[in-house]
C-alpha cells in the first residue's frame, strides 16, 4: 500500500514548463451558447472575440470603428444617406462594405449573402434571436456588390453607423438548417451541434475543441488574412470558483486570467501583494457602473433630502481606498469619466455626515432613543437594503455602508437574494422596498433611456420590460432622453448630456458608487493585450498578443 | 457516564459556552461583531483581537461566538424536529403495522436511498416567499434550513424507534397489559415510549452532528445562512476567497465545526455504550 | 432471487417517478425563469420580445402539462436540451457520469482499503484502538469542502505539487495528477465510517468462539484476521457500503465544486443555480438511479456472500 501511495505522489510531480506556443486563459463563466446572435453574455463575447469579428465595434479609445467593414459609414462620406421611408417617415440607408479577402475558416469568402441571411433570420422573430429592435427597424436589405450590404432603417439615430450585434452568419452552412425549421434553429444550428466546424468562424482563430462546461481550445484559422496570430493554440478554461482559479494560476495550469471575466478586484489586489513579481497586473476601469437604486415609491425615499442624506453619509472614497486600493473611480453620475460625453463639472457629493444630519432634521427625522431617527408620527427610519447574495465584494460594501448609515441614524436591514431571484423578480418587478445595489453595463455614449425614462418603469401591462426600477419620473429627463438619439451632431448632443448628468446628480434616483475596474493578470512573458473597459473584450485584438522574446 | 460521553459533552460545552457568552465577550472586548473596521482588516492575533480580524476588520473570535449561536441553534432545532417527527412515525408504524407500516418504511427506504445533498441543493434554491416566509431574513433562513434538514433527518430516528417499539410491543408484560384491557394510548405512552429513550437519544445526538455539517455545507454552497448573520458555514465560505491572504480565517470556523460535530458524535457513542 | 430483483426495481422506478414529479414542481416554482433573467440582463429586450421568447420556450403553458410532456419525452429516450450549455442533455451527462464514477470508484477503493487497515489495527492491537477511533471521528467530523480547501492550500499552493482543480485534457498519466486531491478529499471523508465499522466487526469476529479456538490451536493472528475474521465481517461492511452511497454522492458534489471538476455533482449544481430545469431534473434522476442501483447491487452481493440471507425474502 505504501508503495502505491509513492507511485501516486511521483506521478504528481509538476508537469514540464509549457512551450510558449500555447496560451492558457482562465475565465469564470462558460458560455450558454456559441451562436453569435442568441443571448448575450460576457463569456461568449470573450471567446467569440478570438474567432469572429463584428462589422463595427468600439475601439480601445471608446470610439466606434470598423471591425470587418472597410469604412465607417457617415453622412459625409455618403455611405449613410438620409431618406424618407415608403410610409413617409424620416429614414436612413446605411452601407457597410466587408473587408477584401475575409474568409470563413473553410475558405468560403464572407459575402453580403451572409449578412442577408443574418438579417432574414433576425427579421423572422420565431428564430428566437434576442433583442429584435434592430431588425424591426431595418426593414429592407439591398446588395449591389458581393461584399456590400445596405440596410434601410425607419428611424434615424446618431448611432446609425453601428451595426451592433448584426454580423455575418455563414449562409453556406446555416441557411438550409434555418429554412428547414425556423423554430428549431436555435438548437439545431451548427454553432451548437457542430461547434468545431471551421466554416463557422472568420476571426484569426477557430474553435478546434469544446469541453462543455470546462473550456474551449482555439487554433489558428488558416484563411485569416489579417496579422498572423502568434500562438499555435489558445485554451480558454472556465473555473467559476475564483479561489480555484487563482490556485490554478499560481500552480501554472493557466497562464493568465482575463480581466473581463476574472478575479474579484479585492482578490486580485491580494494576489498582487503576494505574487506581484510573478505576473503583470493591470487594473482597467470600465463601464460597469455600481450603484444603489432607490425605490422612489417608498415614501421615505420619495423625499429628495433623504436621498441626498444617504449619499452624504456614505463614505465612498474611503471604501474605494480601503477595499479596492483606490482602483475604482468613485462615480458622481451614471456616465463614465472615460466616456467622451462625461461632464467633469457634474455635482460631486462629498462625505459630509454633518450636512446629512442637517438634511434629515430638515426632512423631519429626529434622533430617537436607540440612535435611529423617527418622524413626527414616531415611525423609525428603517430601509431594506438588498443586493445579490454570494457576491462577496457587494456584501462587504453593504455592511460598511450599513454601519455608516447607522451613525447617521438610518437603520438599513440587509436582505439579500440569489442573483437569479434578485434580478428576475425583485428588481424587474420592483419588489424591493428600499435600496438595491447592483451594476449596469452599457456601451460608450449609450443613452440611458431604459433606466431613466418614465415610460420604462416596469409594469405587468408592459410584461415587466423596462429597467427604470427606481420609478424615476422627470419630464425634462424624458424630453432629453427622447431628443438625444435623434441629435445627429455630436456637438449638439454634448449640452444635452451635461443636463442629463446634472439632473441625475441632483435628483439622485440612485446612489452612484463607483465604476468597476477589471483585474487583468498576465504572465510576464506576454505583451500586447489591450483591455478596453467596455463591452468589446480585449480578445477582439488578440492577434496583437505576442510572447516577449 | 462513560469517558466518551464526558469527552463529547466537553467538546460541545466549549462552543455552547461561547454561544451563550457571546454578548459578554462582546462587552469584554469592547467590539461589535457587525461593525466593520476598514483600517484593521486581516489583522493578526493580538490582545485586542485574540484570533485576529476578518476581511472587514471584524473580530474573528467574536464572530465565531455569534456564529456558534446560529450553527448550534440550527443543529439542535433540526435534531429536535427530526426526533419528534421520527419518533412519532416510528412509533406509529410499529403500533399500526400492516399497510401503514409497509408504506411508511418504504418511504423511509426511498429517502435513505436517495442522495440527500443534491436534493438539498434543489430545496435550498427554492423561494421562501412561496410559503410566506420573508426572503433574506436570518430567522427565515434558519427555519428554511431546519425544515429541509429535518425532512431528511427523521428517517434514521424513525427506523431506530420502530425497531425498539416493535421489540417492546412483543414483550410479555406489554402483551399482558394489552390482554388486561389497558387502553392503546396508555399502553404506547406508558410502556413503549419510555423504552425508546435510549436509541432515540443516540439518534438525536447523531442528528445534531449531521445538521451542523449539513448547514456548513449548504452555507459553503451559498444556499445556507446568508451574511451578515455569521454562521460557521458562511464564515468558511467567506474566508474561502481570502484563503491565501488569511488562511487562519478558513482554519477557525472549520475547527469549530469539527469540534461540535465530533462532540455530538462522541455523545452518541457514549449513550450507545452507556 | 429474480422476484426480489423485480420488486426492488419496481420500487426504484416508483421512487424515481415520484422524485421527478416533486422536483419538476419544485424547480418549476423557483423564481427566475430564463426569460425573466434575459430581460434583466439585456436592456434592449422589449415587452413583445419577452412574450415571444416565453412562447418559444413553451413557458406559457401550465406546469402539469409541461411535466407530462417532459415525462413522455424522457420515457421515449429523448432527454432534451440543456438551456445552460445549449447542448443535448445526453451529451453532457455521460462524460460527467464517467468522471464522477471514476472519482467515486477510486475514492471508495482507497477509503475501504485504508479503513480496513485501520480497523484491523484497532481489532488486533487494543492499544491502538483509541487512536483509530479518534482519527475516525475527526475525519468524519470535518466538512468535506474544508478538507478540500486545506489540501489545496498544502499541495497546490504551498508545495505546488498538484493542480488545484479542473480536469486534464491530455488524459493518461496527466489525468491522474488532477484526480489525486479530489480523490484524497473524498477518501478522507469516507475513511472514518469504514475504519469504525471494520474495527467493531473485526473485533466481534475475533472474539467468536471458533476463532478463539483457531488461535488456541496456534493459527497466527494475521492468518486468523485476514483468513477468517475478515470474510466473517464482510456482510456488515458491504451493508455499510450500500448505505453510504447517498452520502458519497453528496461528498462528490461538494468535492467537484471545490476542485471545479466537471462531473455529475457540479453539473447538477450549475443547473440548479442557472435554473436549467431540464438538465437539473435529468441529472438528479440519473444520480438517484445510480445511487439506488448501487444500493441494490450491494444488497445482492450481500446475499451472495452470506448464505443465511440467500433464502430470506
Image (spheres, rainbow, N blue to C red):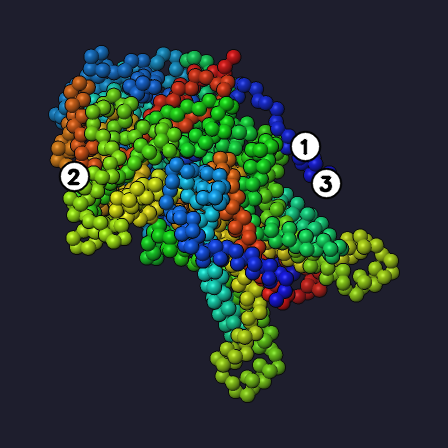
Q: Residues within 10 Å of mark 1 (few under 14, many from 20)?
A: few
Q: Which residue is mark 1?
A: A10
Q: Are marks 1 and 3 on the same chain?
A: yes
Q: Percent x, y for residue A217?
A: 50, 26
Badge 2 local density, few (<14 within 10 Å), some, or many (20+)?
some
Coordinates of residue A236 in the picture (x, y in percent): 48, 28
The residue tagged with tag 1: helix, strand or loop? helix
Q: Are marks 2 and 1 in contact (CB under 8 Å)?
A: no
List the residue tagged with mark 2: A473
- Residue B157 location in percent, x, y? 53, 64
Q: Secondary structure under badge 2?
A: loop
Residue C296: image tag: none
Please give the name of the residue rendered at 21% of the width and 19% of the height, measured from the top-left corner.
A93
Which chain letter matches label 3? A
Q: Is residue C243 above or below residue A238?
A: below
Q: Toward the viewer: C134 or A433?
A: C134
Dot placed on the residue nearer the N-terminal end, 2 or 1? 1
Label 2 to label 3: alpha-carbon separation: 74 Å
Q: Is residue C277 visible?
A: yes
Residue at coordinates 69% horizontally, 59% vertically from top-left? C200
Alpha carbons under labels 1 and 3: distance apart: 12 Å
Residue annotated with mark 3: A2
Name the residue: 48% across, 70% down: B88
Chain to which the residue tagged by mark 2 belongs: A
- Does label 1 or label 3 sit earlier along the sequence? 3
Amino acid at each position: 500500500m505504501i508503495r502505491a501511495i509513492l507511485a501516486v505522489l511521483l506521478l504528481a510531480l509538476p508537469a514540464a514548463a509549457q512551450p510558449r506556443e500555447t496560451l492558457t486563459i482562465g475565465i469564470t463563466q462558460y458560455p450558454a451558447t456559441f451562436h453569435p446572435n442568441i443571448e448575450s453574455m460576457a463569456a461568449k463575447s470573450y471567446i467569440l472575440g478570438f474567432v469572429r469579428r463584428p462589422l463595427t465595434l468600439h475601439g480601445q479609445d471608446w470610439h466606434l470603428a470598423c471591425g470587418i467593414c472597410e469604412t465607417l459609414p457617415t453622412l459625409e462620406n455618403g455611405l449613410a444617406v438620409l431618406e424618407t421611408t415608403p410610409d413617409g417617415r424620416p429614414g436612413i440607408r446605411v452601407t457597410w462594405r466587408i473587408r477584401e479577402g475575409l474568409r470563413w475558416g473553410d475558405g468560403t469568402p464572407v459575402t453580403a449573402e451572409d449578412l442577408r441571411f443574418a438579417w432574414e433570420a433576425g427579421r423572422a422573430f420565431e428564430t428566437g434571436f434576442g433583442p429584435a429592435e434592430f431588425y424591426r427597424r431595418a426593414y429592407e436589405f439591398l446588395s449591389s456588390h458581393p461584399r456590400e450590404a445596405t440596410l434601410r432603417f425607419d428611424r434615424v439615430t446618431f448611432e446609425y453607423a453601428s451595426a451592433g450585434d448584426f454580423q455575418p452568419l455563414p449562409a453556406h452552412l446555416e441557411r438550409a438548417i434555418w429554412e428547414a425549421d425556423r423554430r428549431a434553429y436555435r438548437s439545431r444550428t451548427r454553432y451548437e451541434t457542430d461547434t468545431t466546424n471551421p466554416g463557422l468562424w472568420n476571426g484569426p482563430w477557430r474553435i478546434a475543441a469544446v469541453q462543455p462546461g470546462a473550456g474551449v481550445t482555439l487554433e489558428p484559422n488558416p484563411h485569416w488574412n489579417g496579422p498572423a496570430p502568434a500562438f499555435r493554440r489558445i485554451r480558454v478554461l472556465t473555473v467559476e470558483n475564483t479561489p480555484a482559479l487563482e490556485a490554478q494560476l499560481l500552480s501554472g495550469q493557466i497562464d493568465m486570467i482575463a480581466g473581463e471575466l476574472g478575479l474579484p478586484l479585492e482578490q486580485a489586489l491580494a494576489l498582487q501583494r503576494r505574487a506581484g513579481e510573478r505576473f503583470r497586473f493591470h487594473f482597467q476601469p470600465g463601464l460597469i457602473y455600481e450603484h444603489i437604486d432607490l425605490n422612489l415609491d417608498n415614501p421615505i425615499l420619495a423625499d429628495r433630502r433623504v436621498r441626498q442624506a444617504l449619499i452624504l453619509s456614505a463614505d465612498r472614497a474611503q471604501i474605494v481606498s480601503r477595499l479596492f486600493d483606490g482602483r475604482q473611480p468613485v462615480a458622481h453620475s451614471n456616465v463614465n469619466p472615460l466616456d467622451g460625453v462625461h461632464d467633469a463639472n457634474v455635482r460631486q457629493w462629498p462625505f459630509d455626515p454633518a450636512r446629512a444630519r442637517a438634511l434629515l432634521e430638515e426632512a423631519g427625522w429626529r434622533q430617537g432613543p436607540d440612535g435611529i431617527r423617527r418622524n413626527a408620527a414616531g415611525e423609525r427610519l428603517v430601509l431594506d437594503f438588498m443586493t445579490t447574495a454570494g457576491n462577496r465584494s457587494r456584501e462587504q460594501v453593504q455592511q460598511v455602508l450599513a454601519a455608516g448609515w447607522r451613525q447617521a441614524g438610518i437603520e438599513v436591514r440587509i436582505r439579500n437574494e440569489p442573483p437569479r431571484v434578485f434580478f428576475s423578480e425583485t428588481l424587474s418587478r420592483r419588489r424591493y422596498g428600499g435600496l438595491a445595489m447592483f451594476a449596469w453595463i452599457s456601451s460608450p455614449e449609450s443613452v440611458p433611456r431604459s433606466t431613466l425614462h418614465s415610460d420604462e418603469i416596469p409594469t405587468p401591462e408592459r410584461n415587466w420590460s423596462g429597467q427604470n426600477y427606481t420609478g424615476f419620473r422627470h419630464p425634462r429627463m424624458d424630453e432629453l432622453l427622447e431628443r438625444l438619439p435623434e441629435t445627429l451632431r455630436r456637438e449638439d448632443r454634448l449640452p444635452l448630456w451635461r443636463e442629463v448628468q446634472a439632473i441625475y446628480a441632483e435628483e439622485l434616483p440612485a446612489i452612484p458608487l463607483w465604476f468597476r475596474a477589471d483585474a487583468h493578470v498576465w504572465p510576464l512573458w506576454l505583451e500586447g493585450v489591450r483591455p478596453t473597459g467596455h463591452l468589446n473584450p480585449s480578445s477582439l485584438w488578440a492577434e496583437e498578443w505576442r510572447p516577449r522574446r | 457516564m462513560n469517558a466518551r460521553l464526558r469527552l463529547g459533552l466537553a467538546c460541545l460545552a466549549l462552543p455552547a459556552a461561547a454561544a451563550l457568552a457571546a454578548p459578554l465577550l462582546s462587552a469584554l472586548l469592547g467590539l461589535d461583531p457587525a461593525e466593520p473596521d476598514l483600517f484593521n482588516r486581516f489583522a493578526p492575533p493580538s490582545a485586542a483581537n485574540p484570533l485576529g480580524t476578518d476581511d472587514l476588520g471584524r473580530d474573528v473570535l467574536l464572530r465565531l461566538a455569534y456564529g456558534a449561536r446560529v450553527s448550534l441553534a440550527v443543529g439542535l432545532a433540526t435534531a429536535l424536529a427530526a426526533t419528534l417527527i421520527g419518533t412519532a412515525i416510528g412509533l406509529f408504524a410499529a403500533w399500526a403495522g400492516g399497510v401503514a407500516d409497509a408504506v411508511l418504511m418504504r418511504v423511509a427506504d426511498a429517502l435513505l436511498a436517495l442522495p440527500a445533498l443534491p436534493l438539498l441543493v434543489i430545496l435550498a434554491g427554492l423561494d421562501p416567499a412561496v410559503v410566506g416566509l420573508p426572503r433574506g431574513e436570518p430567522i427565515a433562513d434558519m427555519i428554511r434550513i431546519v425544515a429541509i434538514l429535518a425532512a431528511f433527518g427523521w428517517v434514521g430516528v424513525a427506523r431506530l424507534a420502530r425497531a425498539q417499539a416493535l421489540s417492546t410491543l412483543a414483550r410479555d408484560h406489554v402483551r399482558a397489559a394489552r390482554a388486561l384491557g389497558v387502553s392503546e394510548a396508555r399502553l404506547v405512552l406508558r410502556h413503549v415510549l419510555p423504552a425508546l429513550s435510549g436509541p432515540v437519544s443516540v439518534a438525536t445526538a447523531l442528528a445534531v452532528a449531521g445538521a451542523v455539517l449539513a448547514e456548513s455545507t449548504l452555507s459553503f454552497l451559498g444556499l445556507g445562512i446568508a451574511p451578515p448573520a455569521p454562521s460557521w458555514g458562511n464564515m468558511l465560505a467567506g474566508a474561502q476567497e481570502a484563503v491565501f491572504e488569511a488562511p487562519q480565517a478558513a482554519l477557525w470556523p472549520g475547527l469549530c465545526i469539527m469540534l461540535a460535530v465530533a462532540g455530538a458524535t462522541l455523545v452518541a457513542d457514549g449513550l450507545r455504550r452507556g | 432471487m429474480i422476484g426480489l430483483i423485480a420488486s426492488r426495481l419496481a420500487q426504484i422506478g416508483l421512487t424515481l417517478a415520484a422524485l421527478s414529479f416533486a422536483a419538476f414542481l419544485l424547480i418549476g416554482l423557483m423564481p427566475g425563469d430564463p426569460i425573466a433573467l434575459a430581460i434583466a440582463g439585456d436592456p434592449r429586450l422589449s415587452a413583445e420580445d419577452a412574450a415571444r421568447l416565453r412562447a418559444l420556450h413553451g413557458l406559457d403553458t401550465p406546469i402539469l402539462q409541461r411535466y407530462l410532456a417532459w415525462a413522455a419525452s424522457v420515457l421515449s429516450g429523448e432527454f432534451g436540451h440543456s438551456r445552460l450549455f445549449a447542448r443535448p442533455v445526453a451529451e453532457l451527462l455521460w462524460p460527467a457520469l464517467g468522471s464522477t464514477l471514476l472519482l467515486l470508484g477510486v475514492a471508495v477503493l482507497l477509503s475501504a482499503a485504508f479503513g480496513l487497515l485501520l480497523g484491523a489495527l484497532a481489532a488486533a492491537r487494543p492499544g491502538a484502538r483509541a487512536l483509530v477511533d479518534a482519527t475516525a471521528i475527526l475525519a468524519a467530523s470535518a466538512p468535506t469542502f474544508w478538507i478540500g480547501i486545506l489540501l489545496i492550500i498544502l499541495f497546490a499552493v504551498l508545495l505546488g505539487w498538484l493542480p488545484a482543480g479542473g480536469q486534464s485534457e491530455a488524459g493518461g498519466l496527466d489525468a491522474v495528477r488532477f484526480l489525486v486531491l479530489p480523490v484524497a478529499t473524498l477518501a478522507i471523508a469516507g475513511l472514518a465510517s469504514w475504519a469504525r465499522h471494520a474495527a467493531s466487526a473485526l473485533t466481534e469476529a475475533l472474539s467468536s468462539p471458533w476463532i478463539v479456538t483457531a488461535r488456541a490451536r496456534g493459527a497466527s493472528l494475521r492468518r486468523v484476521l485476514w483468513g477468517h475474521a475478515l470474510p466473517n465481517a464482510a456482510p456488515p461492511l458491504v451493508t455499510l457500503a450500500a448505505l453510504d452511497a447517498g452520502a458519497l454522492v453528496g461528498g462528490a458534489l461538494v468535492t467537484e465544486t471545490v476542485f471545479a471538476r466537471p462531473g455529475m455533482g457540479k453539473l447538477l449544481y450549475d443547473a440548479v443555480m442557472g435554473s436549467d430545469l431540464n438538465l437539473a431534473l435529468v441529472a438528479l434522476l440519473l444520480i438517484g438511479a445510480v445511487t439506488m442501483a448501487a444500493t441494490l447491487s450491494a444488497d445482492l452481493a450481500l446475499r451472495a456472500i452470506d448464505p443465511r440471507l440467500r433464502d430470506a425474502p
